[in-house]
Amino acid sequence: MFCMKKTLSGIKIECVQGDIASQPGIDAVVNAANAQLRIGGGVAGAIHRAAGPGLEQECRPLSPIRPGEAVITGAHNLPNTYVIHCLGPVYGQDRPESLLLANCYRNALKLAEENEIRSVAFPAISTGAFGYPIEDAANVALKTITEILPYLKNVAIIRFVLFGKSDLEVFRDTLESL
């Protein structure tokens, strides 16, 4: 399952191919959410379907969120404890895209720290229906993560879960270059 592991600042960074809604052993999974925090396509659909209707009910009072923002809920029927929901930018529409995307990763890790979460699994936020080019998204994600690593006290594992092999290769190559 694991494609690439690298330890930076004492924190294990992993890139794997798989399903974000099936990450046992990880404390929190990150949902590439929509503004209303409802079931959708892609990552949001997979997470909501696996978590069950309780997730959407818990999300209702937390919405809407804006690009770059993150909120946390329980994981319901997922094999995790938490779901951190981030609204990524729509490429070419929400500006500045790179700052808003970086804020998704910053704010998700801030919530992880505040909730003493040890392991977090991220999808490639905004790269599906929101159209963010995968190479640019991988650069923003991994650059942002490496800037934050020295400040993390609780998080020990950050996993990037990529659905497709080509996306996995882009994230793996970007991680290798760090």
Image (tube, rainbow, N blue to C red):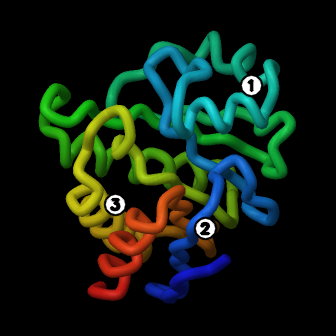
Name the residue that disc number 2 marks. Answer: 155
Q: Do the residues labelled 2 and 1 touch (CB within 8 Å)?
A: no
Query: Which residue occupies the foreground of this view, 115 or 126?
Result: 126
Where, by quadrant of the figure, is residue 83 drawn?
A: top right
Q: Residue at x 36, y 23 (%)?
A: 66
Is 29 left, or right, of 152 in this rendering?
right
The tag earlier along the polypeptide, 1 or 3, is 1
The CA span between labels 1 and 3 is 26 Å
User: What kind of residue is marked 3?
Assistant: Ala
Which of the two discs, 2 and 1, sits closer to the camera? 1
Secondary element under disc 2, as helix, strand or loop, is loop
Crowding around mark 1 (Cα neighbors within 10 Å: few <14, some 14 to 19, many 20+) is many
Q: Residue at x 65, y 37 (%)?
A: 46
Secondary element under disc 3, as helix, strand or loop, is helix
Q: Which residue is drawn at 65% across and 54% down?
A: 19
The CA span between labels 2 and 1 is 24 Å
